């Protein structure tokens, strides 16, 4: 082989080549001393490395290597394998494997040097391993060359540390490609030989080299997908609820996760479980909802009123949405704008009025019952609209619900406003939404055409106004009935569950009647903790030995404890005040 | 001290027993009447069970009445407390309310009678000064 001068810095390949070229039967030390001139400078470091590595290797390796190297010299001249010596193998690798193939999975590349290194006589460079790639298609090599150089350096570094045999530079030649066919067999042989070992350091360069195939997320496509999926799912869920009414109510409670996507009645039930799931799916829903709202909204623009309403509501939504940190609302802003463009301005006044009315009612409701009940009512609102057929309403609920949960009571009004407005964004063919306005839930709900909605929806809307019987009964007691069936540890018939629900209903009614009687007995119109304590006394929970505070301490979390049990604080203040 | 406590305990117990005996006797009499009425006999165990239940329920009633009175921030048990107690059973509640109304009427009548009597007496016997005092009183 011609001694190729290293046009680049000495790579393992070049070094190896040099080794092969200048093969000496003598020991490495002698060989090193025998070398002349330019080679020496280059060789010294690799030779020192080799020495080090060789010392690590078994003692018998060196002499063997030197002997084989001597023989290999002649073999090289002949250009074909005479003996399967490490040197010959390595030479073949050098000849056959193209440099550019280094980029190919390093894992394949590395195994070759490893096993080669282990045998003591080997002074291969990792360059040999890339040559194993030769059987693979060559086109990749063309792609790789640009990346090859930096990778090679990395590889070289590792290999220098790793391998023992790099003491002589070998010119990096492009020959391997030409000789690929000729020595494919040998390379394949080498391949089989080399595969077993896989040094860890080998893999890293390969991973680093792998080009990051990242595509920028297409927001539009993403939203479209969300829309499609959410559109698809509600349709399925809508059908199922209509089928069974009583079980549905039970089902609703048990499947909160299925609800959020549903725009229909199932979503309505979710008032309580919704908040928990809202945040998880908030952004998703928000985006899909808002985009969807903008979708159906243009459709509604043809009917004059709904469109006008939508426009007015859209404005409100935008105004409110932009003010909120809610991502959903922010997304809704741009989504809703198109609506406004297509809508006339006449109805805006009316819409504003109604919005005010709605907002008032919402505020009332919000102030009336802040906690979960507050969440329930506005959600009931939204659910009404959902009943009308707007799929996005549920999603509208969620961000509002989550916003309600997240934000302090100060924001009760605004979230509900937002929630109400998105509802109106999706009235679709239901014009009745326009009418409701001031009479909070009942009026709005009754006016809606609830035919498409399952019977469940009927009580739901009414629930908002005068405390209806059916809905709270169904929603609350089914939960207890499920607890009952759980603790029963036995399968229960549905009829049994129904009876349990009836019993629970009577029991709770009785309790509440008692509370009312107690409050009236004390000449009050509001139920106070004293009434409850009296009730618990009658129940036998509170006795002379066990006081109410003890029960509070035992069963309630700390936050409630602080609120219920008077405690003295600094500054001579007692909280809660007695 | 312990002896005193024990003595007290015993006293209370004996008192209770006497009360129970009294209740038992009353229940027995009532059951006899019912038996004559329905021509059905009561076994002794039945009577004993009824009397025991009655006794314990009376205890409960007493405690509840006291609770109700305290709840209304009163120290005396009122007819209102009794009505509250009887609210569970509709018929009983009705009966009690009727009775309480009767009693209230009677009381009113008595009061009016007394007033009239007093006024008459005052007019007859005393001068306007007494009448004024009565009026102020009433």
Image: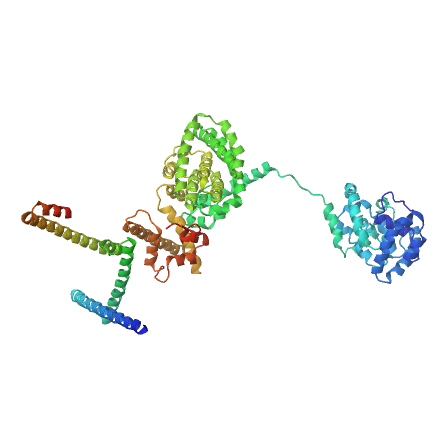
Name the residue nearer the viewer: A437 or B137: B137
Q: Determine the image quadrant of residue A64.
A: bottom right
Residue A479 in the figure: left or right of residue A140: left
Residue A68 x/y as whole percent: 90, 57
Residue B44 in the figure: left or right of residue A185: left
Q: Determine the image quadrant of residue B74.
A: bottom left
What colour-coding does the image apply? rainbow
Is residue B63 placed above or below A159 in the rendered structure? below
| Residue A235 shows in the view | no
Residue A270 x/y as whole percent: 45, 46
Name the residue nearer the viewer: B130 or B31: B130
Count of marks placed on residues: 0
Q: Residue furthest bottom?
A: B3
Residue A264 x/y as whole percent: 45, 41
Name the residue nearer the viewer: A472 or A552: A552
Residue at the spot x=71%, y=43% of the render?
A: A211
Residue A549 x/y as whole percent: 39, 57
| Residue A113 shows in the view | yes
Is residue A351 placed above or below B48 in the rendered structure? above
Q: Determine the image quadrant of residue B86.
A: bottom left
Residue B19 in the figure: left or right of residue A344: left
């Amino acid at each position: 082989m011609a001694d190729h001068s290293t046009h680049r810095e000495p790579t393992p390949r070049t070094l190896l080549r040099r080794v092969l070229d200048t093969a000496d039967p003598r020991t490495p030390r002698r060989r090193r001393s025998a070398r002349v001139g330019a080679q020496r400078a280059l060789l010294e470091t690799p030779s020192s490395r080799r020495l080090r590595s060789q010392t690590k290797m078994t003692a018998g390796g060196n002499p063997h290597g030197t002997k084989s190297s001597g023989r290999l010299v002649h073999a090289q001249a002949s250009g074909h394998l005479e003996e399967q010596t490490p040197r010959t193998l390595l030479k073949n690798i050098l000849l056959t494997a193209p440099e550019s193939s280094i980029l190919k999975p390093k894992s394949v590349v590395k195994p070759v040097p490893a096993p080669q290194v282990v045998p003591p006589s080997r002074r291969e460079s990792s360059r040999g391993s890339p040559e194993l790639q030769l059987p693979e298609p060559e086109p990749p090599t063309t792609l790789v060359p640009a990346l090859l150089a930096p990778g090679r350096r990395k590889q070289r570094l590792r290999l220098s540390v790793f391998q023992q045999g790099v003491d002589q530079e070998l010119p990096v030649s492009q020959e391997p490609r030409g000789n690929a066919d000729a020595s494919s067999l040998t390379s394949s042989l080498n391949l089989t030989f080399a595969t077993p070992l896989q040094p860890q350091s080998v893999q890293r360069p390969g991973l680093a080299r792998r080009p990051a195939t990242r595509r920028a997320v297409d927001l539009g496509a993403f939203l479209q997908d969300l829309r499609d999926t959410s559109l698809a799912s509600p349709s399925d869920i809508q059908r199922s609820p209509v089928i069974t009414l009583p079980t549905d109510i039970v089902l609703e409670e048990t499947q909160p996760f299925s609800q959020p996507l549903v725009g229909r009645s199932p979503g309505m039930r979710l008032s309580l479980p919704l908040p928990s799931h809202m945040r998880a799916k908030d952004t998703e829903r928000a985006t899909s909802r808002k985009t969807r709202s903008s979708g159906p909204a243009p459709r509604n623009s043809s009917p004059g009123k709904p469109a006008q309403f939508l426009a007015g509501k859209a404005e409100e939504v935008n105004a409110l949405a932009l003010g909120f940190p809610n991502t959903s609302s922010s997304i809704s802003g741009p989504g809703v704008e198109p609506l406004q463009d297509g809508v006339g301005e006449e109805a805006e006044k009316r819409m504003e009025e109604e919005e005010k009315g709605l907002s008032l009612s919402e505020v009332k409701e919000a102030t009336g019952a802040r906690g979960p009940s507050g969440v329930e009512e506005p959600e009931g609102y939204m659910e009404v609209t959902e009943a009308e057929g707007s799929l996005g309403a549920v999603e509208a609920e969620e961000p509002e619900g989550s916003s309600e949960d997240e934000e302090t009571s100060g924001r009760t009004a605004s979230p509900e406003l937002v929630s109400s407005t998105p509802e109106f964004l999706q009235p679709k063919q239901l014009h009745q939404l326009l009418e409701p306005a001031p009479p909070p839930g009942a009026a709005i709900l009754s006016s809606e055409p609830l035919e498409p909605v399952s019977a469940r929806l009927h009580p739901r809307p009414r629930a908002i106004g005068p405390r209806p019987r059916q809905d709270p009964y169904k929603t609350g007691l089914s939960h207890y009935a499920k607890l009952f069936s759980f603790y029963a540890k036995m399968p229960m018939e549905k009829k049994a569950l129904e009876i349990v629900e009836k019993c629970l209903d009577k029991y709770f009614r009785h309790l509440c009647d008692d509370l009312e009687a107690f409050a009236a007995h004390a000449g009050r119109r509001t139920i106070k903790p004293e009434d409850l304590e009296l009730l618990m006394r009658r129940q036998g929970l509170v006795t002379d030995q066990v006081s109410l505070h003890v029960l509070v301490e035992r069963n309630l979390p700390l936050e409630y404890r602080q609120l219920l049990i008077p405690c003295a604080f600094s500054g001579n203040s007692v909280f809660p005040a007695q | 001290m312990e002896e005193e406590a024990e003595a007290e305990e015993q006293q209370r117990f004996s008192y209770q027993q006497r009360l129970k005996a009294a209740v038992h006797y009353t229940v027995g009499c009532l059951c006899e009447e019912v038996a004559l009425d329905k021509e059905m006999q009561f076994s002794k165990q039945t009577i004993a069970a009824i009397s025991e239940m009655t006794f314990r329920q009376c205890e409960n009633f007493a405690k509840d009445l006291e609770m109700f009175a305290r709840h209304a921030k009163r120290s005396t048990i009122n007819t209102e407390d009794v009505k509250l107690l009887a609210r569970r059973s509709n018929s009983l509640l009705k009966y009690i309310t009727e009775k309480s109304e009767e009693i209230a009427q009677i009381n009113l009548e008595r009061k009016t009678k007394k007033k009239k009597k007093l006024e008459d007496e005052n007019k007859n016997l005393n001068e306007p000064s007494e009448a004024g005092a009565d009026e102020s009183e009433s």
